[in-house]
Image (cartoon, helix red, strand yellow):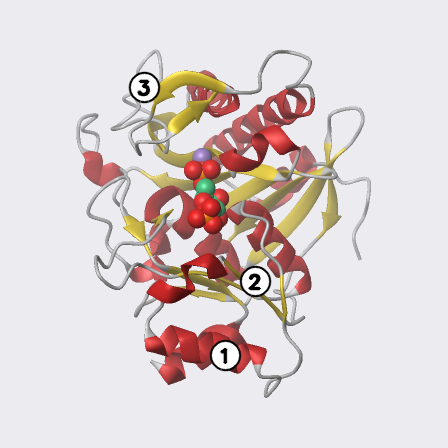
């Protein structure tokens, strides 16, 4: 039974022993509040549109991408608990300012996921994961290239019809809702992946799908396993959130010719795969569990199949 008066502060006090890790999560939640407010007022405060820069992904940077990225870096620097950060928007290692050689934690993030939806008021979000550093060398990118199964906590915020923050620690995934007084209150606890029948796939890529993936999607459409319907927001974080709460599977296959996917392993796939696992869902790339992949580069892209166990298991049987 959820006690609606529990706030995020009380929750992390009760379930996370390490006060340094508590502080990292607190800092991320503060950053998410700031980003949420800016998203909601972007049209008024001249925060819509592009900065004119191109990021490491070769994509045009939106003003809100840059704002969200700076907000997270500044807030995590202020926590004085972070050793190193990695972001979708920055090519390489980010060190807090001032540097913090004694910090124990590494944080990776997609500051704003779903950038193409910013200008049209469709749900977007922030995705993050927290690790322990593996060594104290501030130039060693291996601190960022850890397998997802080393994650200590991960989560996301969705700036949608309400602002919610999902936080996953080992065996416990909970959801908080931002109140009018700017406080996150616990609104559901011990979330278990839903079981309604939804598939979320950008089907415009159909002609590039492997025969096995076409067979899988056709099975879902066939009603052999019940009546599936399609839902695709185009913001991974919002598609994942809907499927987590209600049920369903999200897939963004890798291009079979290059073997390269669309979504980024370290700060998009791994944090959500950790949540899926803690809530009895699953996540794989073309052939193995996302959390078992050893990253080779900060911005590495992989195929992603994430959501209900039933759908992911079915695909595995067919390939
Ligand atoms: P980002 O906005 O952080 O660059 O990520 C965009 C991603 C993801 O949110 C979404 O699922 C996917 O791009 C959508 O890609 P398509 O437009 O190819 O469907
Ligand atoms: Mn993204
Ligand atoms: Mn992004």
Query: Is 256 located above or below residue 76 in the figure?
Result: below
Query: Is 319 located above or below residue 67 in the figure?
Result: below
Left-right relation of 26 to 297? right
* Res 248 visible: yes
- Residue on which disc 1 sits: 218
> Going 32% across and 59% down the picture, which residue do you hit?
254
Q: Is mark 2 within 8 Å of ligand 1?
A: no
2 vs 1, front mark:
1
Query: Is 267 located above or below residue 30 in the figure?
Result: below
Q: Earlier in the sequence, mark 3 or mark 1?
A: 3
* Res 271 visible: no
> Going 35% across and 34% down the picture, which residue do you hit?
106
Q: Which mark is residue 60?
A: none
Gap between marks 2 and 1, in whole Å? Answer: 27 Å
Quarter-of-image position of residue 313: bottom left
Q: Is mark 1 within 8 Å of ligand 1?
A: no
Quarter-of-image position of residue 166: top right
Q: Position of residue 68 (x, y in %)?
A: 50, 24
Q: Earlier in the sequence, mark 2 or mark 1?
A: 1
Neighbour class for label 1 at 10 Å: few (<14), some, many (≥20)? Answer: few
Gap between marks 3 and 1, in whole Å? Answer: 52 Å
Gap between marks 3 and 2, in whole Å? Answer: 34 Å
- Tag 2 and tag 1, C-beta contact below 8 Å: no
3 vs 1, front mark:
1
Neighbour class for label 2 at 10 Å: few (<14), some, many (≥20)? Answer: many
Which image quarter holds the N terminus? bottom right
- Residue on which disc 3 sits: 100
Which image quarter holds the C terminus? bottom left
- SS type, badge 1: helix
- SS type, badge 3: loop
Q: Which mark is residue 279?
A: 2
């Amino acid at each position: 039974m959820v006690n609606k008066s529990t706030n995020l502060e009380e929750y992390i006090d009760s379930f996370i022993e390490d006060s340094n890790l508590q502080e990292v999560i607190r800092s991320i939640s503060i950053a998410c509040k700031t980003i949420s407010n800016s998203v909601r007022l972007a049209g008024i405060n001249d925060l819509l549109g592009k900065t004119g820069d191109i990021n490491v992904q070769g994509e045009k940077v939106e003003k809100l991408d840059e704002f969200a990225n700076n907000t997270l870096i500044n807030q995590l620097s202020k926590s004085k608990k972070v050793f190193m950060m990695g972001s979708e928007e920055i090519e390489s290692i980010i060190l807090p300012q001032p540097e913090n050689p004694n910090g124990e934690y590494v944080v990776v993030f997609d500051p704003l996921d779903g950038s193409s939806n910013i200008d049209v008021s469709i749900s977007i979000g922030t995705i993050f994961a927290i690790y322990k550093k593996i060594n104290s060398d501030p130039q060693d990118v291996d601190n960022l290239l850890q397998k997802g199964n080393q994650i200590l906590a991960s989560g996301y915020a969705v700036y949608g019809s309400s602002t919610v923050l999902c936080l996953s620690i080992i065996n416990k995934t909970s959801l908080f809702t931002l109140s009018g007084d700017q406080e996150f209150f616990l609104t559901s606890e011990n979330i278990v992946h839903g079981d309604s029948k939804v598939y979320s796939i950008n089907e415009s890529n159909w002609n590039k799908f492997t025969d096995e993936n076409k067979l899988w999607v056709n099975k879902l459409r066939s009603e052999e396993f019940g009546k599936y319907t399609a839902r695709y927001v185009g913001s991974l974080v919002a598609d994942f959130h809907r499927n987590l709460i209600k049920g369903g599977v999200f897939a963004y296959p890798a291009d079979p010719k290059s073997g390269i996917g669309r979504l980024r392993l370290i700060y998009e796939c791994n944090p959500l795969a950790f949540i899926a696992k803690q809530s009895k869902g699953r996540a794989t790339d073309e052939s193995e569990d996302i959390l078992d992949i050893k990253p080779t580069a900060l911005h590495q892209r992989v195929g992603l199949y994430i959501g209900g166990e039933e759908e992911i298991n079915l695909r595995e049987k067919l390939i």
